[in-house]
Amino acid sequence: MLKSYSMQQLSKAGKIKVLLLALASLPILVKPIGVKVDLGIKTLVFAFLFGAIAIPVVSKLNAFISGKPIEKPNWNDQILSVKKPLNFFQFGAIFMLVVGSSLVLGSWMKYQFLNQFGLTAILFGFGILLGIQLAVRIASKS
């Protein structure tokens, strides 16, 4: 699903994305949100399913309107590339995973509870990544 890169293999765009993710996650890890909210299992499942279903629908609609094929995203490509719109969703999914993980970890270390906002972000990120894979598979079959 995600290809692993060493820092030497990353393009300038890839290095900027890594820096943005680190800068976004550090404040949340150091000073997490201390509000305990019970969102329920339905919210967690809905976030995952929404990401998994919405991405193939949106990408198929985008391909229909723009006439551009659906291509597998690459971490080194630009986020706002018109040629590969799934790059934006891939970055958004990884952003949700990183920020959600830092929120869960920071809340656990500082307040000793499992932050459900962070869990929702993590599941939404995984849902988006699954949706990207589904969109690429659907596009390759048609």
Image (cartoon, rainbow, N blue to C red):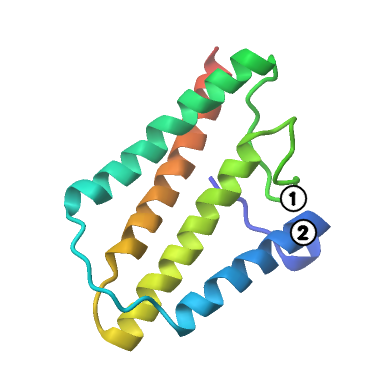
Mark 2 or 1, nearer chain start:
2
Q: Nearer the viewer, residue 33 or 92?
A: 33
Residue 16: x and y, percent? Answer: 74, 62
Q: Is residue 87 left or right of residue 32?
A: right
Q: Is residue 137 visible?
A: yes
Task: Name the quadrant of the C terminus.
Answer: top right
Residue 85: x and y, percent? Answer: 65, 34
Secondary structure under tag 1 reads loop
Residue 64: x and y, percent? Answer: 60, 13
Q: Is residue 11 visible?
A: no
Picture layout, residue 141 above or below residue 12: above
Picture residue at 75% right of the left edge, 67% below the top: 7
Q: Is residue 138 left or right of residue 13?
A: left
Circle 2: is it few (<14), some (14-19), or many (20+) Cα within 10 Å?
Answer: some
Picture layout, residue 115 above or below residue 124: below
Asked which quadrant contains residue 15, the reply is bottom right
Picture residue at 54% right of the left edge, 57% below the top: 95
> Residue most toward the bottom?
110
Q: Are marks 2 and 1 in contact (CB under 8 Å)?
A: yes
Q: Nearer the viewer, residue 10 or 56?
A: 56
Amino acid identity at mark 2: Leu
Picture residue at 51% right of the left edge, 36% below the top: 132
Q: CA distance from mark 2 to mark 1?
A: 6 Å
Amino acid identity at mark 1: Asn
Which residue is disc 1 drawn over? Answer: 76
Secondary structure under tag 2 reads loop
Picture layout, residue 1 above or below residue 27: above
- Circle number at residue 10: 2
